[in-house]
Structures are given as C-alpha cells and as structure tokens.
Amino acid sequence: MTTYEPLNKNPTNSGKNTNAGEVKLSRDFPITRESFETTELFPTVTKWYNLNANQKEANKHLSRLLVICNTLRVYPEDLTKGDPIDSLKQTMIKFKEVVDAGNIQHTHQNKVSTIPQSLLEYETGLKNFLSTEKYMPPTAKVFRNPKPNQYLIFLNDDEITKVFHILSQQKDRRFVIMATLQHEIFARIEALHAWTVDNVVIKNDTIDGVHYQYAEVKRFFEPKQHEYYDKIILDPRVLKIIKKLHEIQKGEPVVAKTEKRNWNINYNKILRNIYTQLGKTNDIDCMDKNKDAWYWWNRPTHALRKSGSAQALRRCGYDYSNVASMGWASDELLRKTYAQPKVLLEKSCEYCKPPEHEQENESFCSFAHYLAFQYNQRKPKKPTEDVEYLKARIRELEAKSV
C-alpha cells in the first residue's frame, strides 16, 4: 500500500479551524469531509462524485467511502489499483474485521451506535467508486443481503392517550400537534415539516341518523416516495386541532424551516422518554437491532407512522388496500407488517357488532362506523335501527316500483 507524505505535516491542525472561518485541508488521517471533497487533494474522488447525477446518492456513497478510507488508513486511489473485484473483496473483508473489533473511524459525532448493523451500504459505495476506473461486474458481491428485520410497532388505545397527554404538558404545543397529526394520518415527519396546512377540507355526513364530521387532506405530499396521497382525519380530538391549525397556520409549516433541526432533536428526545416510560424500550435493548425496542429508540417519529397505520387498520376492519392508498407504497407491504391470522378476520365492531368483553383496542368494520360510534356518544347503535332502516328501504323500493 502506497504511503503519501501529508501536505499538512502538523497533525494538530488537520481539518480543524485555524482561524475564524478557515479550515485546514490535508491528506492527514483521519481525512476530513472538506479535504475529501477537494479536487487538488483527491482528484479521483471528485471525478467519481461528479459522474453521479443523483446528488443525494452521491453524498451517501462518498460518506461511506470516506469511512472506509479513514478506518483502514488507505487513500482512495490505492483502492483502484489492481483487479477491481479483488480490491472490493479484500477491502471489505479487512474493513469488516476492523469494524467487528469496534475500531471503525466515523466522520460524524453524536452516534447512536458506533458499530453499523450492516456493511452493505459501505460495500455499495466502494463498488460504485471502483466501477468508475475499471469494469465492475454487476454480480460482484462480498456480503449477502440480510433479511430485513420485521418490527411490530403499535400503541394500544390507552398508550396513545398517555402519549398525547404527556406531550400536551410540554411548553411547546407543537410537540403534541405534530404527534397527534402524524399518528392520525400516519405520515413521515419530513412530510409533515413540508406541509403548509392549506389543503384541508371539512366534511359532514350522516349514518343511521347520526351526524358526524371529519376532514380530508387532499394531495398530501410524501417526499420520500415522491407521491401524493389523500388522507383523512377521523378522531374528533385531532379534528379539533386541525380546524384551529388551519385557521392560524394556513400557508405555513407548523415548525419553521430555520427551527426544524433543533426542534427535531428535542422532539425525538421527548418521544424516547415517553416510550421508555411505557416500557417500549430501554438503555440496553435499544442497542439490539433484532428487538422492537431498537426501533422505538432509533426511529421515534417513524414509530408514530407505523402505530398510526395499525390504528387505521383497526378502524376499518383491516382493509389493507384502503389504508395503503393513504400513505403506503402497496397493500402487500402493509400486510407484511401487520398481517392478521385468519381467526381474527371475523372482527367485531364497537358500533354494529360490539364484542362481549371489553377489548384492549377498539375495532370497527369501517371508517363510517368508527365515526358513528364517536358521534353517538361512544355508544353502539340500537338493534331496532337495523329493522327501521330495512322498513324504510322497503317502502322506498315499493314507491319506485309503482
């Protein structure tokens, strides 16, 4: 492996501010991100980076390559010497040995976990880099794709109430506003931050003589999927929030863009504390990626999206297609996450077919019956209502036949 004389021979200044606004660029290890992106120091990296039209993907690959170089103390141009397949295999095997020993050299701080759970992203970044110099067969591979972990993430009705109650006690009201909305429409937090609360339509309807109200959120944009979804707000408590929010916040996001980063840090911290209180996670299990506790701790806001999806399924008799159309890529993906045994398919409905015993989670056969139950003082409909409805329907049909 070639050894280079660093341009900056004073290691104490490598990549650090020497004067206000000045960053010292160097080939010293650990190489800084600023140095790695400098053409004069690393021309092969610049050439490779510029070939990728997808800037987000290019940044991700560059970050992974930088970690590999710093961890193994190897310059990127060294990796391109010799057969690319051999280089890929030897580099990744050595990288894995160092990572497993706990000696990975990250380039960022405040890490949740020092040791990555998977090396596939690093292998992909290295493979992409090597392919710019010499032909790399698409089938070249070192590590197999691991089977993705399946997490069963949901809050029961009582836990949902507790989460929102605790958040409502916070000084910043935006915490409870964002959490209730995210859970109700099961959106990603990035999508909520981009939303300007300007596409809300209040609807009124009647069923069995019960008048109810709900809200439609038209063409809600999910940046990650680059898709628009029509969402609904059914819970009267959340509807009250969205009505007021639509009046005072219309045309603007709930959290200003300039505040978003720090606000998210505090929001995630509060959610983690709440999940810990509920027994969903703890300081030990949150490090094990094979446990649900890991997800609650490391994906605190996304846990609300998943739990909200489970809640929506309970409200409509597990109509996967209906719920998926409001925010998931496919009903198949939703079904894999929240598959139900056949024995549970014959579900009760708090409104039209109440269970004999009180359940941990209320369930309904349709969104309409969920709303009817909420606006009927949370009482099931009377059996006589079915009879009266049938009589009225018969009279209506008889009148048409005359």
Image (spheres, grey):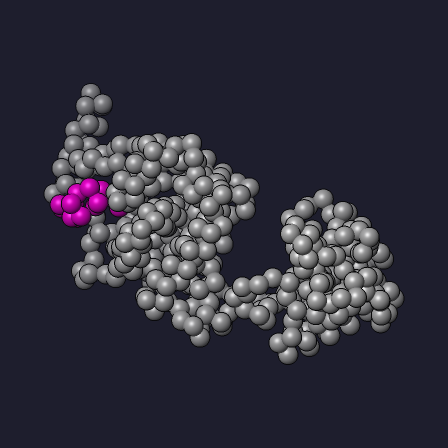
Residue 346 relative to residue 266: left or right: left
Q: Residue most toward the front? A: 19
> Which residue extends farthest top?
402
Is residue 266 placed above or below 322 in the rendered structure? below
**Quadrant assignment, res 274:** bottom left
Q: Position of residue 58 (x, y in %)?
A: 69, 51
User: Which residue is found at the position 18% from the left and 37% from the top?
Assistant: 210
Please identify the quarter of the rendering in which residue 373 is found. top left
Q: Is residue 246 left or right of residue 372?
A: right
Residue 6 position within the rendered picture, expressed as x and y whole percent measured from the top left: 81, 65
Q: Nearer the viewer, residue 323 or 225?
A: 225
Q: Nearer the viewer, residue 52 or 144?
A: 52
Give the side of residue 34 with respect to residue 391, left or right: right
Is residue 212 found left or right of 249 in the rendered image? left
The answer to which of 162 and 221 lies nearer the viewer is 162
Q: Which residues are magenta?
A: 368-383
The residue under the point 82% across, 69% down is: 86
Quick one: quadrant of the C terminus? top left
Residue occupying image coordinates x 71% and y 63%: 13
Residue sitting at 44 percent across and 75 percent down? 284
Residue 91 in percent (x, y) is at 76, 70
Q: Quadrant of the N terminus?
A: bottom right
Inspect this view and state whether residue 54 appears.
Answer: yes
Tally of numbered discs: 0
Could one spot residue 338 in this view of the protein?
A: no
Q: Residue furthest bottom?
A: 101
In the rendered image, residue 166 lying in the magenta stretch gets the answer no
Measuring from the top left, give residue 331's x and y in whole percent: 47, 50
